[in-house]
Image: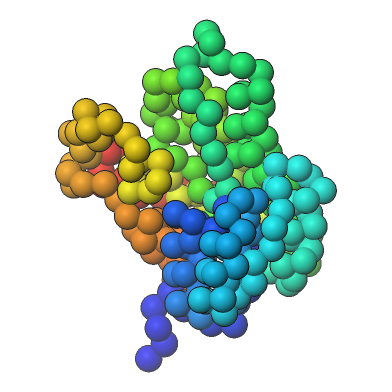
Amino acid sequence: MAEFASLEGKTALVTGGSRGIGAAIARELSRAGASVVVGYRAGAEEAEALAKEIGGRAIAADVSTAEDAERLVNEAGDLDILVNNAGLTRDGLLARMSDDDWHTVIETNLSSVFYTCRAVTRPMMKKRAGVIVNVSSIVGIHGNWGQTNYAASKAGIIGFTKSLARELGSRNVRANVVAPGYIATRLTDVLPDEVRTAMLEQTPLARLGEPDDVAGAVRFLCSDAASFITGEVVLVDGGMGM
């Protein structure tokens, strides 16, 4: 009997793949049988170690620039799967937010998705097959204090992906979004106890998610088990967004 959500014989690129959620996604896609390319901007040692662990490749690139994003996609090869996970935060109240903090977040989180998706669109359309999964956030749906730039970038990913799914559907190319809630990563490890407590109070499952929780959802959406799913937003948030 075939393994559920198998990705045997597929080639996948995961951006922001050196650590946290991206690394968990890379491992999960590899476990499913895919050959995985780990895209990264920082954390070279971690990225190379991960690539060695999963038998894949690590490629350095700054996907917030069009040239580097296109180079990354080209070097990754004939892609069946693209997972856009690269992202960062520059939190602060709007009244005091600098132009640089706005542009850095928008370029890294949202423009990168445009650049990489544009680069894979023609090859995937030509072979009439392909899957794109873009990682957004619960913040892109509900907003969050001090994160107007981050919320705008993550909400933009949702609208972008839904439009992309409409454009590519007739060529059998699917595009979906995974929107994590509060996940146990380096970013949440440094939060004050009162902030962490407030997060848990908003989460019906009463725990932080793990990177593997997000990775499992991505694997499913990348597989043929989800072949009739496109343009959707899958919340991996412990029930926070319902």
Residue sitting farthest toward the top: 95
Percent position of residue 133, x then y: 55, 55
- Image quadrant where one finds the C terminus: top left
Q: How is the image coloured?
A: rainbow
Quarter of the image where one finds residue 46: bottom right
Percent position of residue 208, x then y: 26, 46
Nearer to the camera, 40 or 49 = 49
Residue sitting farthest toward the right: 67
Residue 183, compared with residue 229, is above or below; it is: above
Residue sitting farthest toward the front: 45
Q: Which residue occupies 72% across, 67% down?
A: 76
Nearer to the camera, 132 or 208 = 208
Residue 96, compared with residue 31, is above or below; it is: above
Q: Which residue occupies 51% across, 48% down?
A: 135
Residue 59 seen in the current view: yes
Q: Which residue occupies 80% across, 57% down?
A: 71
Percent position of residue 131, x then y: 59, 62
Nearer to the camera, 240 or 66 = 66
Residue 159 seen in the current view: no
Q: Which residue occupies 60% across, 32% down?
A: 105
Please state if 203 lies on the left or on the right of 71 as rendered: left
- Image quadrant where one finds the N terminus: bottom left
Report how many numbered discs are placed on residues in the image: 0
Please state if 200 lies on the left or on the right of 97 as rendered: left
